[in-house]
Image: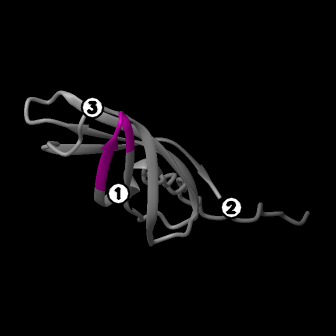
Amino acid sequence: MPTTTAPASAPATPATTAAPATTAAPAVDPRSQITFPQVQGTCDNGQLSASGAYVNNNPQTYTFSFTVTFFNSAGQVLGQGNGTVAHAPPHSRGPFGAAGSCTDVNGAASHREQVTSITPG
């Protein structure tokens, strides 16, 4: 009677673990990439006219709205205006204008700009 031998079993393969999932770096708020390096304002009969330059440091085109506020040395608001820049190209610098109300910005000790809304395109 012939004898049969079971085939040798293949050596066990070590268990493999999946590579850890990569986590993307947190997205940078595109508002934080808009700066206003140059700002000036005039007040005429309670009407603020502000102008200057913005810089879009984002890697894509954005349209954004912003406020510009002028303060005296005591931190009191002297004037505030609103503006919009349409289709600011990536990594670009350009002019802006804003309008609003004021008491007197000639004595402004400081100003602050804040992007209030931003959309791609």
Q: Quadrant of the C terminus?
A: bottom right
Mark with earlier residue (2, 1): 2
Mark with earlier residue (3, 2): 2
Mark 1 surroundings within 10 Å by alpha-carbon count, few (fewer than 14), some (14 through 19), many (20 or more): some
Q: Quadrant of residue 40?
A: bottom left
- Give the label on residue 9, or none: 2
The answer to the question of whether label 3 and label 1 lie on touching residues, with beta carbons closer than 8 A, is no
Residue 38 in view (yes/no): yes
Q: Among all residues in the image, which is located at the extreme right?
A: 1
Which amino acid, by three-letter code, is at mark 2? Ser
- Image spot of residue 112 (x, y percent): 27, 43
Above or below — where is 70 with respect to 8?
above
Residue for badge 1? 35
Mark 2 surroundings within 10 Å by alpha-carbon count, few (fewer than 14), some (14 through 19), many (20 or more): few
Residue 20 counted in the magenta span: no
Residue 27 in view (yes/no): no
Please, what secondary structure does the residue beneath circle 3 have?
Answer: loop
- Image spot of residue 118 (x, y percent): 54, 46
- Image spot of residue 19 (x, y percent): 51, 57
- Give the label on residue 103, or none: 3
Please, what secondary structure does the residue beneath circle 1 have?
Answer: strand
Q: Nearer the viewer, mark 3 or mark 1?
A: 3
Please, what secondary structure does the residue beneath circle 2 have?
Answer: loop
Residue 43 counted in the magenta span: yes
The residue positioned 62% from the left and 54% from the top of the image is 120
Q: Nearer the viewer, mark 3 or mark 2?
A: 3
The residue positioned 41% from the left and 65% from the top of the image is 57
Q: Nearer the viewer, mark 2 or mark 1?
A: 1
The span picked out in magenta is: 40-48
